[in-house]
Image (cartoon, rainbow, N blue to C red):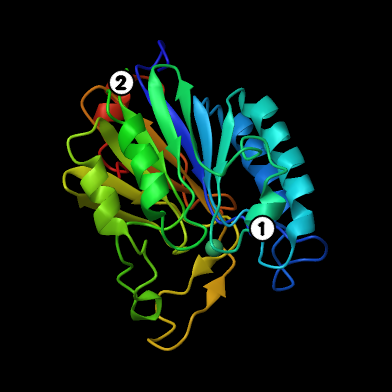
Amino acid sequence: MSSATGRFTVLHVSDVHATEEGLLYGTVDGVGRLERVGDYARSVGMTPEAVVITGDLIQRGHPGAYASVARACARLEEIVGAPVFTVLGNHDEPAAAASLPGHHHRHYGVEHVEGHRILRLDSSAGSLGPAQLAWLAETLREPYGAGSIIALHHPPVESPLPSLSKQGLADAHELLTVLERSDTRAILAGHFHHPLAASLGGIPVFVGPSLAYHQVMDAGPDTVAGHDAPMFSLVQLTAPGVSAAAIDLRPPQPIFALPITSPSEKAENTTHAP
Ligand SMILES: [Fe+2]
């Protein structure tokens, strides 16, 4: 929790899809985009307390990319001054991913950052399974500080897109049963390549956008397509609540920009207020 802002901020990145060489679909340099996230955060003064990357760190079939992903994460840690935590997605290769920091022993774990608890889960198989859920239940048995954040790849909720039906976490019901009456403040996920907000049993769920490509939302029920719109999000926890904002890594040119010199002027500037 930043004493200056009263907020605990998570910079949430998902679905990097890094490749060993060349560009994914001739366009996407996942590792390069991870580096740009750090540059972007620094340039606009973002000061997150933690960075969470919710899976699909590599494109399937490119296990050699983990070395460059690890280097990019280390650089990101240095630039934003906050720890970077990763989980695995369905494109990830668990054996090769054991080389990543935080993954040597197993692909899930618990982290404690400034009074908050971040639980990294492994849904690379599409589900969590009984052993991991039992570990989660035991870990959450005692509340911690300002609460817990769950990070996993597969959302425990379905996408509204017909082309992505039944792509959510296979044992979502079992996960939510474990989270009942726990101190969980938010669930962060990825996988859909489009942002989605939900509430399950009173717990906010934020599906982050993808750093690699954004789902074409009107591609039709039998087509999955992507367009080049790299995004990440900022999740902020305060004492009373939690919010998430999606951010374009490569925004288009602004159509207007006005200086704000004082809070009162900001309040009075109704002409251009959003
Ligand atoms: Fe993905």
Q: Quadrant of the N terminus?
A: top left
179 vs 209, nearest the viewer: 179
Q: Is residue 131 visible?
A: yes
- Residue found at x 62% / y 38%: 105
- Residue 47 versus residue 87: which sits nearer the camera? 87
Could you tell me residue 181's position as x and y percent? 17, 35
Which image quadrant: the C terminus?
top left
**Disc 1 residue crowd, few under 14, some 14–19, many 20+, Cα 10 Å:** many
State the residue at coordinates (29%, 41%).
273
Q: Which residue is mark 1?
A: 58
Whole-percent x, y for residue 267 in the image: 25, 28
Pointer 2 residue: 146
Q: Nearer the viewer, residue 80 or 261?
A: 80
Would you say the residues marked 1 and 2 are in contact, meaning their CB atoms lie under 8 Å apart?
no
As helix, strand or loop, the secondary structure at mark 1 comes to: loop
Cα distance, mark 1 to mark 2?
A: 32 Å
On screen, residue 207 above or below 222: above
| Residue at the spot 37% in from the left edge and 86% down from the top edge | 221
Give coordinates of residue 136: x percent, y percent: 36, 39
Q: Amino acid at mark 1?
A: Ile
Question: Considering only vertical position in the picture, is 247 above or below 30?
Answer: above
**What element does badge 2 sit on?**
loop
| Corner quadrant of residue 186 | top left
Q: Is residue 121 left or right of residue 212?
A: left
Which amino acid lies under the numbered mark 2 shown in the image of this protein? Ala
